[in-house]
Amino acid sequence: MQGLRKALALVAAALFASGSIADTVPGRGSERVPLVIGHRGGATGYLPDHTLENYALGIQLGADYVEPDLVATKDGHLIARHEPNLIDTTNVKDLPQFAARKRSVMIDGALVEGFFASDFTLAEIKQLRAVQPLGDRDPSFNGKFQIPTLEEIIDFVKRKSAEEGRVIGIYPETKHPTYHQSIGLPLEDRLLAVLTRAGWNRRDAPVFIQSFETANLRHLRSRTAVRLVQLVDADDVNTDGSLAFNKPYDKPYDWVVSGRAGLFKDLLTPQGLAEVKTYADGIGPWKYYLMSTACKVVNGGGCADTSGDGAVDERDRALLAPTAIVANAHALGLLVHPYTFRNEQKRLASNYQGNPINEYLAFYELGVDGVFSDFADTAHAARVMYLLKHDAAYARCLVDSRSCR
């Protein structure tokens, strides 16, 4: 797999030595190719999430956008962490000065134990260091990188844009907005204030704001022209390829609080998409909504180990036919940015034959407007292959001239 990564990086570098494909202000509406969105940075397969070092490598590997997940500190600063709970993504549990901060908190109806950003000032957050949260990824960079603020990320991205000679954007997610409102640290206006100071609170800024909740996106729409994206989740994929909706991944949490009936999937029906269109510019669905996978069922109801490797995972599942969601969303003018694309063999359906490039190509051919990827180099290399097939003249123009449009 390491050899594959190096090969993909070389392909991308050789074909596009002068920069990544999408080098204007983003969105497939103004681009001829899908965006590479750096999930938690874009080099998350290699480095700890949400660090400037991750963003730097993700940009170098071809990301057009980097994604900061936003949570609030005790003194109201927005920092980049995947969750309010810092226990899995930082070394906080190893620092004796913070041992007494460990507690249990109810977030979106689930009791969670750990260390929470809202119990720390920004000065204290700066004492922490990021760690790799996934056990099957390289831990050698644990404890080396600081936790950045949103302001630091924007300044960094602007600097990298100037260095790279292309527009690089940010794709912030407001994490658990109802929870943050409940503790007196709402995220939305803080985010808009930072964007305003940066000169990015405008329609043509290289910014998308995303959320799994709906009420905060409606609030944001009333206060900003920045492009908004409705994320759509689920809990798991059943053996037949249908999606499972178990709490707390069954519906937006603001629906739980307001008593609204329905599930996440209702946002992707024709009626749901029409509703989303009233306040957002796109959808960010879990990729299995667009193309799911099913498996051979054995006695007891589980999936068979058809690959014979002793484990049951995506390698034992096969692709189903695509749904109509992309076409339905595009008919309404909504962008479609599915998540999350990863390189590990265990995450690739059998149809992809162990090659992550094949998964990207399948979704690019489906017509998605961008992909969230942990491996921006692979997403970028696959995009090169896709473009050479469909628009070789444009590909050659981009190699020869950065002003190609």
Image (spheres, rainbow, N blue to C red):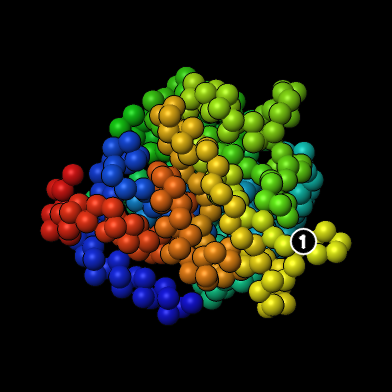
Give neighbour class at mark 1: few <14, some 14-19, many 20+ (Cα, 10 Å): few
Place of residue 258 in the rendered image (x, y in percent of width and height, measured from the top left): 72, 23
Q: Residue at x 57, y 70 (%)?
A: 345
Q: Residue at x 41, y 45 (%)?
A: 367
In-front residue for pair 269/213:
269
Residue named by callout 1: 297
Q: Residue at x 75, y 67 (%)?
A: 304
Secondary structure type for disc 1: loop
In-front residue for pair 103/308:
308
In-front residue for pair 272/373:
272
Instruction: Relative to 332, say whether 340 is above or below.
Output: below
Q: Is residue 136 left or right of residue 56?
A: right
The quadrant of the picture occupied by the C terminus is: top left
Q: Amino acid at mark 1?
A: Val
**Is residue 182 visible to us here?**
no
In-front residue for pair 127/129:
129
Place of residue 165 in the rendered image (x, y in percent of width and height, measured from the top left): 21, 53
